Image (tube, grey):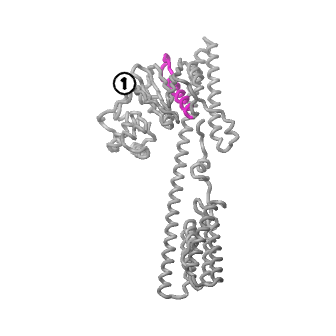
Amino acid sequence: MGYGPVSMAALGRAVTGRDLTATESGSGSATGWRGAHAGTRADVLIATVAGAVDLFGLFLTLPSAGPGERAVGALVMVATAASLIFRRRSPVAVLLFTLALIVTLNTALAMPQRFGITLAVALYTVGLAGRPRTVALAALATLAAQATGYRNASESFLWLFSGDVVATLLVLGVSAAVRHWQGQLEVNRALLADRALSDERRRIARELHDIVAHHITTMHLMSGGARASLDRDPEAARAALLTLEASGRVALGEMRQLLGVLRSDHDPDQAASVAPQPGVDDLARLIAESCLAGLPTELRVLGAPRALPLPVGLAVYRITQEALTNARKHAGNAATATVRLEYLPGAVAVEIRDDGGGEVVVGDYAMTGGGHGLVGMRERVAVHGGSFEAGRVADGGFRVAATLPLAGEEPEPPPAATPVAVPVVSADPASEPERLARLSPAEVALLRLFATGKGDGEIAAAIREEPAALERREADLLTKLDVRDRAQAVVVAYESGLVRAGRGDRAR
């Protein structure tokens, strides 16, 4: 299939470059600052630049020093700069080593050294990776080491020492800001991972629904047919039982494929052995199964057939499968169905239409314990950025249509949409129940939009909100209505008279 389930570890590696489930320990730990080889090249470059700048500053402050003093100063500067290579692994140890060499330098030379680049980098690393207490002690130790160079308490030295205090606070302030930014970045990464996992769970739920609902419906119909004809037509009963057996075998095979993909994140060898998911090439088998299950179905293919991306082919197959399953449930015994697959420039379109006149109306099926099929089909199409329509047609029967764009191909202008009936929205309900009285006018309008069966994109455009804001408004609405999901909210809308079904409408 085009994409498969992922574990938290794999998703973390994909989103952040490392395992989000791994835990870090140690007093000097900080997110992103672990690993023996992390940032080695960058740290070598930082150490080189810091050492060069500090050496240049040393020779500027010792213009009259002798060769011996210059050699000692240069040796100390090189040693402190070289220690920065290990700053990520042992930030506190590197800072202490730097401070010890600074004290040595201040003792050996007559002129105290200023707050150098090497010291700033070492202190910044401790501020970024250390705990608050460690950072405070590091600041005090830094100022104490700098003070060893001021043997004279003259006004000029006190002025210079105050500059060291400001520099220390500035470095620690920058490190605190960066640390806060890193924490926010990690939170955002975790939220992205959680959202991706939630999307993956919904995708798996759609797959399970389509596999189980389709084959269980077929098996139920065929077992009933076999029982009815067992005495009067043994051959027909035998054929029905064979179809039932085949449907069960296919269902088990598809379940194994799905479970195999679920395990493939931890077992690459098993992933290689997982059979491909069904696509448009399997529609003929689906049509034959529908005919055997009692719904005569015709397949029409328009346009020049071509290979489709695996996710698109799977979506076409599942939409057709679910629509035919619904037709067998609700279209009636004398109904027939037509599947129309059309290859368009830049897209592929599938339409499933039945001519049945089943008795199920809006509110009886989709709104009371069912209705996952239409939601799942709409979500499948939304994943690919396509368009989806479903509803009763004027001349009877039910129509499901989806158009899926193909990446890299130029689409043609979309044809005019076939009109479908939607629930008629009441202008003003005669009497709102207590639950509707809790809603604001904007929330009542949002509930009306939900009841019409519009997609999230259409609803977001209608209320001029971003999808994220729509999710928040939906959550608030469900809380006020004291319902679990959107389907239950629509039940409230129908039962209260806020909306009423169009005459003879059916829902799948």
| Residue 492 image offset from top left, x and y in percent | 39, 37
Residue beneath the point at 59% across and 39% down? 3
Query: How far across and down, in percent of the image, does residue 355 sit?
Result: 46, 19
Q: In which quarter of the image is residue 98?
A: bottom right
Up the image or down, 368 lies above or below 145; here it is above
Q: Kindly give the residue lying farthest to the right in the view shown.
A: 269
Residue 106, position as x, y percentages in the image: 59, 82
Rendered location of residue 480, percent (x, y)? 39, 45
Question: Taking 190 as reference, is 462 left or right?
Answer: left
Is 117 in front, or is 328? 117
> Principal SS element in the magenta part?
helix
In which quadrant will I find the N terminus? top right
The answer to whether residue 184 is visible is: yes
Dot 1 crowding, Cα within 10 Å, few <14, some 14–19, many 20+: few
- Tell me the SS state at disc 1: loop
Q: Mark 1 points at which residue?
A: 503
Choose between 53 and 265: the one closer to the eye.
Answer: 53
Total label count?
Answer: 1
| Residue at image point 64% right, 70% down | 83
Identified at 57% across, 31% down, the residue is 308
Can residue 435 be spotted in the picture?
A: no
Looking at the rendered structure, the kind of residue marked 1 is Arg
Magenta residues (range) = 311-339
Q: Tell me, yes or no, whether the highlighted magenta stretch contains residue 338.
A: yes
The foreground one among 118 and 125 is 118
Q: Does the magenta stretch include residue 157?
A: no
Who is closer to the viewer here, 352 or 159?
A: 159
Q: In this view, does 102 lie to the left or right of 438?
A: right
